Amino acid sequence: MRISRVLVPSVSTILAATITVACAGQAAPRLPGELAWTIGYDPKTFDPAKVDDQASELVRYLTGGVLLRFNRSTQKVEPQLAENWSLSPDGRTLVFKLRGGLQFSDGSKLTSRDAAWSIKRVLSPETGAPTAEEFISPAGVTLETPDERTLIVHLPKRVIGIGKVFDEIAIEPAQRPSEGRVTAGPFLVADYRRSQYVRLRRNPHYFARDNNGVQLPFATGIRLDVVDNHEQVIRLFEHGEYDVIDNLPPDYFGLLKQKAPGAVRDLGASLNTEQMWFNQAPGAPLAEWEKSWFRSQAFRVAVSRSIHRTDLARIAYEGHATPAYSFISPANSVWYDRTITVPHEDTEAAKASLFRAGFRMNGSVLTDSAGHTVKFSILTNAGNAARMKMATLIQEDLKSLGMQVTVVALDFPALIERLMHTQDYEACLLGLENVDTEPNAMMNLWLSSSPNHQWDPSEKTPATAWEAEIDKQIQLQATSPAPQVRKAAVDRVQQIVADQQPFIYLVYPNVLKAISPQLRGVQPTILTPGLVWNIEAISRDEGRAAAGR
Amino acid sequence: MAGRLKSRIMALGLLACLVLIAIAVVAAPGASFSAQDREQLLAGTSTHHPTGTDALGRDRMVRVGAALLLSLAGAVAAAALTTMAAAAVGTISAFSHAYLGSLAMLVCDVFLALPWLFLLMMVRSALPLTTSPAHSAAITFLVLAALGWPACARAVYRGAIDLRNAEWLLQARAGGLHGRQIARHVLPNLMPLLLPQFLVSVPAFVIAEANLGALGLGIGEPLPSWGGMLLELDNSAMLVRTSWIYLPIALLILVLLLLEAIAIEV
């Protein structure tokens, strides 16, 4: 009896699963002057009003003409289709004055009526636009168009940071939504092949010009290939098929740096955080003694103090991460509080505080006052190498406290089922992606009543005094018109979180980019959409030549 | 025939040597598959770490040795369980009423049609989270065994049917042989069928565990497993750092070839 029928396909499967370098596909041919990079998956929609995923958001950014644009470099709101704008002192009336001679990409005239129609469409419940929620009371918003170039927006109540909201509303021709085929932005959707690419073409009627009066954008088009294989992206970038890699995995950074030292950039800490937390939900199916550990501030702080964050950054992220102690990254210079006091790494101090809280060492094993061995699991998602490494490093770090930790990797659906529904877990290690510098964007994480308040979701009333204080401060920052009051409230929340450690922040992964040496005009920034935020000004050397510029 | 026997003995000898070396490496004083030398990440050959370290600074030789022992022990145990279960189901089905036999084979077919990988993932995610890595390893192989018996049972069933219809057994049963006595006479006659089934199952379970580990759903850290170590090969950035990264896949292929050589033409 031969067993080759078992062995050969099995070994092949293993090899195919582990060595994925060789058989990657080829990119579609590049057109003259065209820029190219990748998106991880197909955009869910090309309708700019219905965007709720990153790929669709990128297409909207590249194609949509907006009244105001949030400058990712200066972090200030600037007029785009609007020549100027103003906000009344009570924060409830916005007046936009449109530029003269604006046209859509098909040559038709763009007026304030188009802008009003586009905004109304976003506000309409029938559209289901996620942006509508940012107006807080979208039903109460009214619009006026006294003339072709003036648009007045009345809000029922003040909305903090309202200017940025208009960065997400693409102006479309009134009554003619075209899913990106007719736009007022720098590009328009020219072709889309599912699971292959989205091709954008230059808008010949785009209003913007550079300092020399040359019409923008410089590039003749953009090809966004749908590829979710890092190996393939990096190989094709090396071959010059792609111009940028926006989120370069840390382990590939060094490899690419060896081959093309000038092509990679580490922009420092991102806005994103990696954190672990203990399950404090009263209804969780855990033993009562475990719940009491996780509700103990001394326990959480001791765990936090025994984690070597510099090792996590150095080992799990190859040095391309920054140790984290707060939910706001130092990259968010406006809101980050450098004065907060955090529990620094000190295993002996951590042990001492555990002993004060009634824990005891029984040989090399930590037990609570009732004699229960302190053991728990850390859950994370399978397939994320950096998180698995961090969990394994933390497992070893906590061994020094006598804690027995099991690392469990689950596929994402099983993980979400436990986190959101059964709450059958002890500790979890995951990341949070922040695309906005505004603390308002994190309200759903901090309000105790929120289902995303991970350590104890959907509390009817705040379970502790410090959670009540967070609720109060986070609502204060969301409603106060005074910047200094908002800053003080956010600083207070940062200090409470540092003291209580409901989330034990681990690292801020760094922003890693790869940029083709052929590109001109790139100004890297940590904010989405990263390298291409100033897409109008970006070109390839041969692109300029082809366009005769 | 003598040549085949010789090559089988050689393969068995080589495998035994590998196992002995692995035991020596894992049991050596100071050896630990979980100790992290955080200043020696993905290191090359050194006196402390002859085959270097992995991405967390753990000794690669100790981890590969432990993975080999764990994988072989688990696969042999799972194969033994599978073979015993298949022998029981196949024999009982063959010697019971025809409709019971058909029902048992139908159950086998249903089992064979199940998407085993998803079942394994479901079982893995349903385990208590505090299950220790050693227990999760044992459960992984138990589940593999529980899912692996039907193909073997079908083959045993066919063999047992042939035996049931053999003249010598018909005469024995007519003479009053029944129950345990039948089993005592039938099972030795099924050995030429059961042994190859057992030998085929061992590499199949080794590879199944490695597959599961390569998906990140196998044996939990810090216990080493083939699959967990093969995951490193998924990353070309790692491949250029040290050639020792190929040690687990090289050894896995060698072990599988030796297991095939042992099982071949039994």
Image: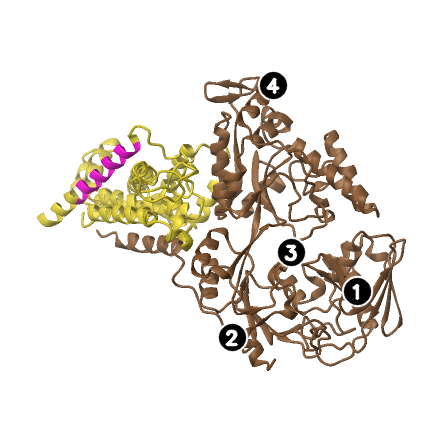
> Is residue A212 depicted above or below A130 in this figure?
below
Q: Which numbered marker is on residue A30?
A: 2
Single out the mark in the foreground, 1 or 3. 3
Label 4: which secondary element: helix
Mark 3 and mark 2 on one chain? yes
Give the mark nearest the N terminus, 3 or 2. Answer: 2
Q: In the image, which lettered chain appears brown?
A: A
Q: Nearer the viewer, residue A519 or A16?
A: A519
Q: Provide the residue span drawn in magenta.
A: B11-26
Which subunit holds the residue at mark 1?
A
Which subunit holds the residue at mark 4?
A
Residue B1, visible in the rendered structure: no
Give the Cα distance between marks 2 and 4.
Answer: 66 Å
What residue is pinned by disc 3?
A527
Give the mark nearest the N terminus, 2 or 4. Answer: 2
Residue drawn 29% across the image and 52% down it: A7
Q: Is residue B20 left or right of residue A110?
A: left
Give the Cα distance between marks 1 and 3.
Answer: 25 Å
Give the Cα distance between marks 2 and 1.
Answer: 36 Å
